[in-house]
Amino acid sequence: MKCPLQISYENLPESEALTSHIRQKADKLEQVFQHLIACNVTVGLPHRHSQQGERYFVHIDVTAPGTELVSNKQSHEDVYVALRDAFDATRRLLEERARHLRGQTKQHAEPMHGTVARLLDDFGFIEGDDGNDYYFSPENLVDQVFDKLTEGTPVQFLPEVAQEGRQAKRISTGKHRYNAD
């Protein structure tokens, strides 16, 4: 690992095997995010309690340009499982930070608005604002029962093009621009 790695043990004797395992895991973090400034890993046991089965905790504090990322909620009866979970959580934080820096933040689909155009026995069609018809089935309704739906009801939905044609997913009759609140 190019960046400084500090390993601490609390209420636990140092272990060469554990230290080597931590170094390997930390090296993999630099493959995800190459510009790490520092990585501090603390492994330990809470103060002795009368509980059966001790749970090791792992706290990882990574410093990168412009941010500090902390993973500290990982604990397990097996120290290697706790380490795996903590490094996995840290890796996900670093991947998210790298995506953010590249401007690749997750985009959520914008719902489309329309009205229920036709209802048949077990499916229906919505006419979207774009003038197209979108097929839907009762499973696609979020806050409405299919039998209570009426033609002309304003809805919002997520459009999707499938093999069968245009479909409406996650259909909602809740608050949207057609309601006069």
Image (cartoon, helix red, strand yellow):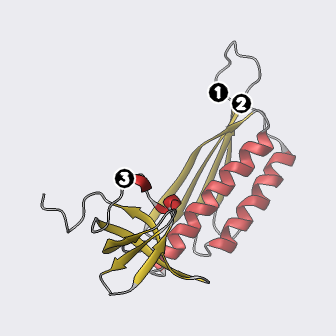
- Residue at 53% from the left image edge and 52% from the top image edge: 70
- Regarding residue 144, the answer to whether it shows in the image is no
- Residue at 48% from the left image edge and 59% from the top image edge: 68
Pointer 2 residue: 55
Name the spot of residue 163 as percent of width and height, x first: 62, 84
Pointer 3 residue: 148
Q: Earlier in the sequence, mark 3 or mark 1?
A: 1
**Which element type, helix, strand or loop, lies under badge 2?**
loop
Tell me if residue 75 comes above or below residue 144 in the rendering: above
**Which element type, helix, strand or loop, lies under badge 1?**
loop
**Whole-number angstrom distance, CA of label 1 to CA of label 2:** 8 Å
Tell me if residue 111 comes above or below residue 121 in the rendering: below
Quarter of the image that includes the C terminus: bottom left
Name the spot of residue 123 as percent of width and height, x first: 49, 66
Q: Which is more foreground, mark 1 or mark 2?
A: 2
- Regarding residue 7, the answer to whether it shows in the image is yes
Question: Dot 1 surroundings within 10 Å: few (below 14), some, or many (20 or more)?
Answer: few
Pointer 1 residue: 46
**Which element type, helix, strand or loop, lies under badge 3?**
helix
Q: Amino acid at mark 2?
A: Arg
